[in-house]
Image (spheres, rainbow, N blue to C red):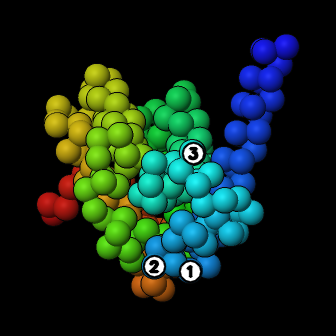
């Protein structure tokens, strides 16, 4: 009987947590980080404010988990690419292309992340952040290419960070209307990273 009660409580906690995260996502998309206030999230989720603190330490914790939920489809897709049998070069190319496509569909999310000072604080760039998780996975692709003799030896973590940030810069140009063709931009990034810019 105790086990059954525990299981029901776990299910209720999971449902409540999902309600809170869905409400937080709506507030974030409707009002940005400026309107991302615990009271508003509680009202939107239909729970007491105290319930939020049973599931999340504070506003920063809730915001971080809300963003992770927003990015989850992209992270799942990235993992599928990185774990595939594609060559290291093709993995990087496919990851880049899918990043463009994801943010084309999620423009608002990109604007929120790029435009918010709050999201650029140290608490959102700590070592266990999704950004560094992606850097680590991309670094492994560079390492794989080096082992296969496709890439020269390098500091793969630094190279992965540069690669990921280059993607962000070109996606921003695309969303600002400075570029409209990912089929053109992705080969540009790949060419610069694989061949350099020397004539």
The residue labelled by disc 1 is: 31
Q: How many marks?
A: 3
Q: Which mark is residue 7?
A: none
Q: Are marks 2 and 1 in contact (CB under 8 Å)?
A: yes
Tell me the quadrant of the picture where the N terminus can be found: top right
Spatial CA span between label 3 and label 2:
22 Å
Mark 3 and mark 2 lie on one chain; the one further toward the N terminus is 2
Q: Secondary structure at mark 2?
A: helix
The residue labelled by disc 3 is: 55
Residue 172 in picture, x, y percent from top left: 41, 74
Mark 1 and mark 3 lie on one chain; the one further toward the N terminus is 1
Relative to 190, 97 lies left or right: right
Q: What residue do we see at 16% from left, 36% from top?
A: 154
Q: What residue do we see at 30% from left, 65% from top?
A: 120
Q: Are marks 1 and 3 in contact (CB under 8 Å)?
A: no
Q: Secondary structure at mark 3?
A: helix
Q: Secondary structure at mark 1?
A: helix
Spatial CA span between label 1 and label 3:
22 Å
Relative to 145, 51 lies left or right: right
The residue labelled by disc 2 is: 34
Residue 128 in picture, x, y percent from top left: 35, 40
């Amino acid at each position: 009987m105790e086990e059954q009660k525990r299981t029901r409580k776990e299910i209720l906690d999971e449902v409540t947590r999902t309600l809170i995260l869905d409400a937080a996502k709506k507030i974030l998309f409707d009002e940005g980080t400026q309107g991302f206030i615990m009271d508003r999230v509680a009202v939107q989720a239909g729970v007491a404010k105290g319930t939020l603190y049973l599931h999340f330490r504070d506003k920063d914790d809730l915001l971080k988990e809300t963003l992770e939920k927003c990015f989850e489809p992209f992270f799942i897709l990235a993992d599928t690419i990185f774990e595939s049998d594609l060559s290291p070069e093709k993995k990087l190319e496919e990851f880049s292309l899918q990043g463009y496509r994801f943010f084309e569909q999620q423009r608002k999310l990109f604007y929120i992340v790029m435009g918010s000072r709050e999201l650029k604080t140290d608490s959102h760039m700590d070592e266990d952040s999704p950004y560094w998780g992606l850097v680590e996975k991309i670094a492994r692709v560079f390492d794989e290419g080096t082992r296969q003799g496709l890439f020269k030896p390098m500091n793969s973590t630094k190279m992965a960070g540069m690669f990921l940030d280059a993607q962000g810069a070109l996606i921003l140009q695309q969303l600002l209307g400075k570029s409209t063709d990912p089929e053109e931009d992705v080969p540009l990034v790949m060419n610069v990273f694989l061949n350099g810019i020397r004539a």
